[in-house]
């Protein structure tokens, strides 16, 4: 498929492919669904999906599945009757998985371990009274981090330790585009990937450094990405590509891999969440390659987070303090109340997701008074530590059961999130960063923000307009008529000025002219069955507009 087709994905002729975006390790709702800024946004209780615990066959060796590997002590485990699965369930699964020639032996082993852990009832429950608010030593205020000196050689030496890894497994189907989401045009004809490349190239040119870009694709985005990155062949940046694991969906009624029942197309498979980044880095050979080049740290972020840029203060702090893992968190707003947060728990820093919260404490968890921060999914990790922990099979992140129905068949996919790995790394910390480092584009409402006069782009960096007095961005809610990028662009002759906007709600068949200025709280609603066109050069401030007379009054 030619590159132009992806870059032109705003056209209405592009339809979503035949496989669903819901299978991908990205979050569709900003700050929602239990995933915070980028953790996976679909959490379910383990009891919601599998209640099939019985007996392990006598003499069957579960050690190879990783069920009984040691892990840091936590709260009392969820009650389990006995080490547990129906008589031959795991052995049957292993036999079925050996038939899957489409995936590697590493993927087969990883999949069996994941399913075995899930069926064992190993998932553990937080004891609420043991939760402590992290101190500033555990979640470091960004402003207290020492600034890097002005010596360009020192900066170059620091950058030469770094790898930038973008999670590139998601499709743009929910926004009406085909191909990887990272090739949606964000601003001035530039895609997410264009901006990322320009950012890193700018650093390399300025400091004569060699920061590489690594893209972790899913099987949904890999082939297209290979073609797309050819356009950067003359850029001052080395681009590495690898695939995350490909696991078979399980048919819920008997936990059989769906491809062994004949569903061998893409619908039979899924990428198991961004927690897979750690084993996939090792299994692909990329981890060893990067270590051999003298790289020491990786900055991991979602490709659609325009605020996730290289920050030398954070990298310098990690190097100086020998931190193996650092998660960027930022203050919660009411839009982020379901987002995962960092806690201190039995002497370690840990990510707490809403799915782990006892029902009677969910209200407390959502409060922005007690749990004031949430995970942006910007992660800084030591590469040697990743190698050590993956080789020891020590990364036992919480499993996220994600039940689905595809073509009338109930299936289950088991996933993990990269943020949950924090408790396994030594000297792990969080850093409380400014909100500017969390600017995800999950929907066209976000696209409106970044295409407006609220932001400019310089050398690939998206910079907020200092003329905006309010530190928070406007709240924007667009109706379903604006959901797809193509329709969104057609309905705006030009993006309105929103420097002084507090909130915007648009519903119905609304069309915007050029040179429009929106201020304060604005609601624009077309009457049912009617069309409302906002004239060029209109100024709307603190109004509810349902006809043209409302603008003049």
Image (cartoon, grey):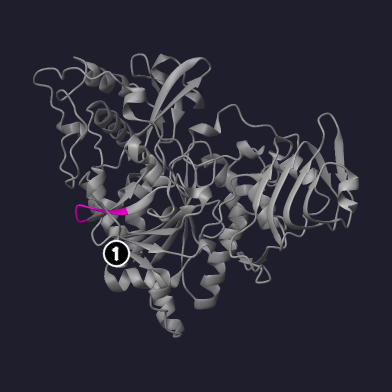
- The range drawn in magenta is 343-347
Q: Is residue 211 magenta?
A: no
Looking at the picture, how far across and down is residue 127, in whole percent?
23, 42
Closer-to-camera residue (509/444): 509
Q: Name the side, left or right, on which 48 lies relative to 72.
A: right
| Looking at the image, residue 50 lies above or below residue 334 | above
Q: Residue at x 46, y 68 (%)?
A: 311
Residue 343 drawn at (x, y percent)? 31, 53
- Check the image and report above or below for 270 versus 208: above
For the N terminus, the image quarter is: top right
Magenta segment: does it hold 346? yes
Q: Nearer the viewer, residue 149 or 385?
A: 149
Pick the residue in front: 553 or 121. 553
Left or right of residue 11: residue 552: right
Q: Residues within 10 Å of mark 1 (few under 14, many from 20)?
A: few
Q: Nearer the viewer, residue 492 or 24?
A: 492
Residue furthest toward the bottom?
151
Task: Decide whether the magenta segment is chiefly helix, strand or loop.
Answer: strand
**Residue occupying image coordinates x 44% and y 72%:** 312
Q: Is residue 278 visible?
A: yes
Residue 411 in the image: state x and y as whole percent.
43, 21
The residue indicated by pointer 1 is 135
Q: Position of residue 147 (x, y in %)?
A: 42, 79
- 444 displayed left or right of 144: right
Visible residue check, residue 10: no
In the rendered image, the residue lying farthest to the front is: 553
Local secondary structure at mark 1: loop
Residue 89 location, quadrant: top left
């Amino acid at each position: 498929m030619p590159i132009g087709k992806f870059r032109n994905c705003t056209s209405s002729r592009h339809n979503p492919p035949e496989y669903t975006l819901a299978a991908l390790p990205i979050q569709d709702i900003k700050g929602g669904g239990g995933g915070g800024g980028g953790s996976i946004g679909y959490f379910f209780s383990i009891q919601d999906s599998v209640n099939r615990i019985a007996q392990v066959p006598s003499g069957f060796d579960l050690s190879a599945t990783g069920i009984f590997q040691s892990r840091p002590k936590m709260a009392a485990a969820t009650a389990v009757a006995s080490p547990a699965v129906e008589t031959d369930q795991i052995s049957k699964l292993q036999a079925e998985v050996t038939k899957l020639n489409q995936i590697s032996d590493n993927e087969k082993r990883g999949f069996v371990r994941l399913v075995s852990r899930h069926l064992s009832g190993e998932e553990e429950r937080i004891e609420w009274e043991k939760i402590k608010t992290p101190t500033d030593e555990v979640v470091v205020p960004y402003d207290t981090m020492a600034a890097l000196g002005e010596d360009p050689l020192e900066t170059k030496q620091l950058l030469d330790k770094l790898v930038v890894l973008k999670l590139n497994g998601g499709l743009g189907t929910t926004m009406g585009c085909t191909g990887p989401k990272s090739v949606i045009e964000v601003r001035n004809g530039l895609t997410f990937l264009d901006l990322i490349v320009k950012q890193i190239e700018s650093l390399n040119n300025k400091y004569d450094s060699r920061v590489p870009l690594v893209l972790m694709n899913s099987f949904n985005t890999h082939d297209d990405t290979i073609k797309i990155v050819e356009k950067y062949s003359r850029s001052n940046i080395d681009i590495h590509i690898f695939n995350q694991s490909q696991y078979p969906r399980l048919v819920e009624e008997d936990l059989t891999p769906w491809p062994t029942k004949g569903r061998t197309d893409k619908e039979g498979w899924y990428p198991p969440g961004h927690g897979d980044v750690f084993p996939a880095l090792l299994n692909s050979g990329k981890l060893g390659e990067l270590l051999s080049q003298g790289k020491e740290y990786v900055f991991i972020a979602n490709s659609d987070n325009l605020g996730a840029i290289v920050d030398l203060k954070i990298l310098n702090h990690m190097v100086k303090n020998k931190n193996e893992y650092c998660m960027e968190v930022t203050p919660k707003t009411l839009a982020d109340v379901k987002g995962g947060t960092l806690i201190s728990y039995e002497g370690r820093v840990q990510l707490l997701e809403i799915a782990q919260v006892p029902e009677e404490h969910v209200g407390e968890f959502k409060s922005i008074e007690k749990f004031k921060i949430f995970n942006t999914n910007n992660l800084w990790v030591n590469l040697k530590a990743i190698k050590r922990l993956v080789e020891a099979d020590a990364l036992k992140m919480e499993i996220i059961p994600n039940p689905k129905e595809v073509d009338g068949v109930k299936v289950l996919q088991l996933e993990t999130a990269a943020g949950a790995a924090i408790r396994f790394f030594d000297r792990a910390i969080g850093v409380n960063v400014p909100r500017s480092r969390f600017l995800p584009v999950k929907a066209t409402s976000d696209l409106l923000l970044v295409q407006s006069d609220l932001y400019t782009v310089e050398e690939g960096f998206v910079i907020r307009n200092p003329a905006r007095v309010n530190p928070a961005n406007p709240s924007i809610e667009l109706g379903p008529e604006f959901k797809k990028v193509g329709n969104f662009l057609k309905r705006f002759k030009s993006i309105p000025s929103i420097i002084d906007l507090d909130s915007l709600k648009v519903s119905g068949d609304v069309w915007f002219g050029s040179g429009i200025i929106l201020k304060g709280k604005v609601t624009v609603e077309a009457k049912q069955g009617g069309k409302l066109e906002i004239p060029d050069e209109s100024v709307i401030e603190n109004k509810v507009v349902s006809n043209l007379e409302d603008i003049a009054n």
